[in-house]
Image (tube, rainbow, N blue to C red):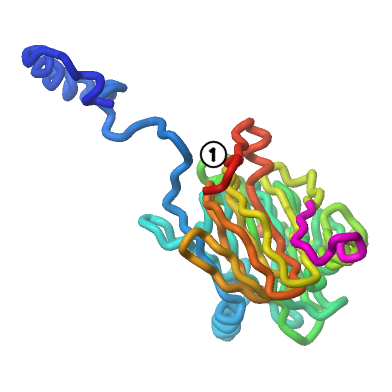
Amino acid sequence: MEALATAGTSAGTAAALEQLYPRLARETFTAGWHSRSPAVWPHPRTGFKPRLWSYKRGSALLDEAGELISPERAERRNLVMFNPMEGNDYFALPTMMAAYQMIKGGEYARNHRHSPNALRVVIDAQDDDVFTVVDGVCLPMRRGDVLLTPNWCWHSHFNRGSGKAYWLDVLDVPLVHLLQPMFFEPGQAFEQSILEQHAEHPYRIETAQVARQMASEPGASAWRSRALPAPSMKTISLTLHTTQAPAVSTPVQAVENRIYTVVEGSGQTHFGQETLQWERGDVFVAPMWTSHFHAAAGPVRLLEISDRALFEALGFHRSAPTPQ
Ligand SMILES: [Fe+2]
């Protein structure tokens, strides 16, 4: 931009400009035509890369951590998945973070609330042993369930069984860091009072039930996708991808950042030259504008958690007509 802006100027003018720039800087101005980096570019670019985190490895490391750290000490006993890039050791994507969390039988993850929106996807839990409490409503956490805890809702988790329970946490913390409206409040009491108990609630989505419905419809052996309604989440969208037989998805390339978690089955996702192999419990990310498609090895339930709702609300959503 600088070369373009100063092309054709005389040597005298160029020298005068060079003398002007430090004087501008002393008064905290930058000449727009002289900034070190451009303000606009032709298409999205990001330093975040496609990456997969293995549930086998993550749960083994969480078990190890579980010998050393209690939920009382940790607030939440979780392993955060970070995308390895300069200056980042916490975020999987620019707008969302992801973590594996584990609570043992008899443990309670204390009550608190915060401005980031959060959700959990249950990977392993004994039926009727594990619960999330949201604003006093106690909701069961069963394998494949998605539990929503929108912005500023009180939430806590407990396991009254004897086995360990594991789930994936996804929060829009990086977005809240960027925009800066962060608030956090610990509950006055460690445990949250239970006012109601429900299995059916807008904050609990049973992916098993949605998948059963999709399997009963014609064309169930092809790759199919269904949006899961979560109107309480203003920044996060959910899509369930299923097939009853080996199948390949259509390639996609769009502005949303996507976290995928494998609820059932195995397969692979192709990102240009790179292929990620996945199985149940694994988590992988497809950053903004990354063209990719999936290939299921057999029956699959794959949950996509994206920031599409955010981009749509802001008018920034865009897809490539033909993925590259
Ligand atoms: Fe929380």
The picture places residue 146, in percent across and down from the top left corner, at 77, 62
Note whether residue 194 is visible: no
Residue drawn at x 65%, y 76% is: 279
If the picture is divided into quarters, which one holds ligand 1? bottom right
The picture places residue 108, in percent across and down from the top left corner, at 73, 73
The picture places residue 117, in percent across and down from the top left corner, at 68, 50
* Nearer to me, 220 or 306: 220
Quarter of the image where one finds residue 262:
bottom right
Span of residues in magenta: 214-226
Q: Which residue is mark 1?
A: 179
Q: Residues within 10 Å of mark 1 (few under 14, many from 20)?
A: few
Residue drawn at x 68%, y 63% is: 248
Is 278 drawn above or below residue 117 in the view shown? below
The picture places residue 34, in percent across and down from the top left corner, at 25, 25
Quarter of the image where one finds residue 55:
bottom right
* Nearer to me, 104 or 278: 278
Q: Per the image, is 218 magenta?
A: yes
Is 95 drawn above or below residue 145 in the view shown? above
Element on which disc 1 rests = helix
Residue drawn at x 13%, y 22% is: 18
Residue drawn at x 81%, y 54% is: 135
